[in-house]
Amino acid sequence: MDPTRAFVKNVRRVVIKVGTAVVTRDDGRLAVGRVGAIFEQLEGLNAQGFEIILVTSGAVGAGRQRLKYRRLVNSSFADLQKPQVELDGKACAAVGQNGLMALYDNLLSQLDITSSQILVTDNDFKSRDFRVQLSQTVNSLLALRSIPIFNENDAISTRRAPYADSSGIFWDNDSLAGLLALELKADLLVLLSDVDGLYSGPPSDPRSKLINTYIKEKHEGAITFGDKSRVGRGGMNAKVKAALNTACSGTPVIIASGFTADNITKVLNGERVGTLFHQDAHSWLPLTDVGSREMAVAARECSRKLQGLSSEDRAKILFDIATSLEANEGLIMVENDLDVAAAGSAGYDRSLISRLALTPWKATLDSLISGLAKSIRTLAEMDEPVGQVLKRTELAEGLVLEKTSCPLGVLLVVFESRPDALAQIASLAIRSGNGLLLKGGKEAMRSNTILHKVRFRGAGNNYLQCFRNLVITSSIPDTVGAKLIGLVTSREEISDLLKLDDVIDLVIPRGSNRLVSEIKNSTKIPVLGHADGICHIYVDKSANMDMAKRIVLDAKIDYPAACNAMETLLVHHDLSTNGELQKLVDELQLEGVTLYGGPKASSLLEIEEAPSFHHEYSSRACTVEIVSDVDAAIAHIHKNGRHVRNFHAHTDCIVADDNEVAEVFLHNVDSAAVFHNASTRFCDGARFGLGAEVGISTSRIHARGPVGVEGLLTTRWILRGSGQVVDGDKGVIYTHKDISLE
């Protein structure tokens, strides 16, 4: 839950206002599907015990559409040739209100909810007796789980168009909703609009950003409003006025989109949806808080400064990071141990806790921090990757074209569990000259924070002294700026960042299939990564079985939570008849591996059948199946190796002494990495000699497999001439000669 919206835990009575643009379509007809979706949310909230009060617009618009049709049907051809008089708005309101409530009552009845209609005018609220009676009536309706539906009675209201003023007790349905929220002692007011909330400028302007929390001292006078509502009286200006008045009087307000599914439910779950107005907002957030766009723009500006450094200076940053990691290993581990303990207490899955812990995979290895430092130094010692001439061509005499390497720009990496990924990714970004925004999982909050930038609150001098060199951002020189690498702290900020396709150049999700799918479906920015890591090992009938046992056991038990661990074991049919499959199964079970079988293997081995061939266990468990030959193994991998669109298989291996069979496998399996007689665990950036990896990509576009520095670079063309012009190609003699890079 967003800490700025924690107050919703105590919300019971809610006023929800739906605007004309929400309840009607562009052609003026009622948006039955959209209204129905909103009412389904109200039904769920009503069942949970929330007291729902609805304020609706739309009567005038709905009535106008119906009366226009009636006038058309009843008009002669001669009547239609005459200038058409604008329909009386009050007549439209009378007709539309009837149709609006008929629809509302019908939809709510289908959900087994009783609705009630209350029409009011500005003059009604001048009577104290009316206000008392109104509260009593609403309380009675809510006690009976009925939903009161309010609207201004435009048909008899003395207020007339153009409604430009804001005098009186209320002046539109936004201000009516605010008045009712205060009068009926609501805990929250939700104003549903046709946009996501309040933006810093017109929502259609790509430079505008969504304001999550309105701070009067910061935002008043700094916002440019777009046009008024396409069909109603108000627009965002009217909503902001109503929200400010209501919030200042003590009732929080959220302006959100009525077009987005489940937005009301999300609001009441405390998720960051729309724009919040609260009388205490100024004390929650600093007046100079950095928004998503500012963070991304700052990362881009710093990356350009980074690219201006010499290769030696950029390498020095990495050496400093490696030294800081080693010098502060003890303190880093303290924070990581706290994360691991909290994850265990919270009941997280064992595979997640395994990825979370900054501990070596085997006792014989150096510590993981030492391994990280070593990989970062390897990166620093690599040949300079930026600005390398990849190809040089003479286009014509005195006209030379160079294809050079250059950074992508700004990367957004969203990762789960693995805090060591933060150090690896940051180092890769620095080496490749890219700006970086990082969002880790909440389960690794302490570890990620300490690795990125230490917070000194409440620390004594000795503590400060220990952290003076820690760790990543502190190693970046002031000439570049620590904003080169931004740490995103709120999950809700991700949705804002994914909209910044004009600033962020690449998104890299590292985590579950669900995370990859959600990100891929939520952004126009290119996405690089992998979904489920379904790694297969096929043991052919020609395999050396001692070798097969070593490879299979290593691929499964060396680090079961890794994405390159074996999840499915395929064996040739002959091995199931000569006893070799049973020996292999016995070895796995001896190591504590739980086995699930495909239709053939489960029957033969008397093990539980796997619910799906597409399942990433990330633990000491795997699926076993019997196939007829190498072609059947390849077909199985192609059918079950991928799940998300445009993401393909991860790493697959064949164990075979028959080289012809092995070559068939190597050349026909469509995976990011294909091995012969080697554990799938070798699919790793460090083991490939890349120094580190930002992730493993199973997509076809750009990089594939372990992605190191090269995967974070693109190319640009540099042309050097001496005054040449095209002039229809009359004066140019093209030679197109390759020039040696040496």
Image (cartoon, rainbow, N blue to C red):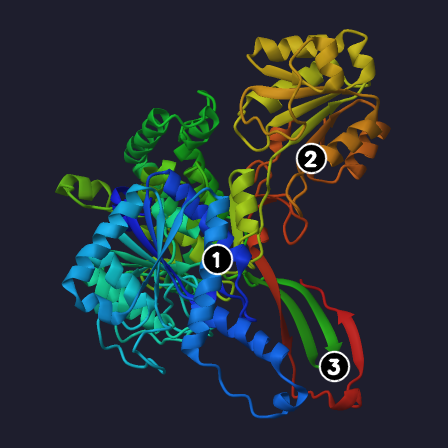
Q: Is residue 595 above or below residue 419?
A: above
Query: Most extreme residue toward the bottom, as rendered?
Result: 82
Residue 461 versus residue 665 in the image, above or below: below
**Viewer-side label of 2, 3:** 2
Q: Give the alpha-carbon distance from disc 3 to disc 1, as whole Å.
A: 81 Å
Question: Looking at the picture, how far across and down is residue 546, in whole percent?
Answer: 70, 13
Find disc 2 in the rendering and name its residue. Answer: 641
At which x and y percent is residue 276?
30, 58
The part of the image, by quadrant, that contains residue 388 is bottom right
Mark 2 residue crowding within 10 angstroms, few (<14) / some (14–19) / many (20+): many
Which mark's residue is nearer the viewer, 1 or 2? 1
- Numbered mark located on residue 397 in the image: 3
> In front: mark 3 or mark 1?
1
Check contact, mark 1 vs mark 2: CB within 8 A: no
Q: Is residue 29 positioned above or below 344 on the image?
A: below
Q: Which mark is residue 414?
A: none
Residue at disc 2, secondary structure:
loop
Q: Position of residue 127 (x, y in %)?
A: 17, 66
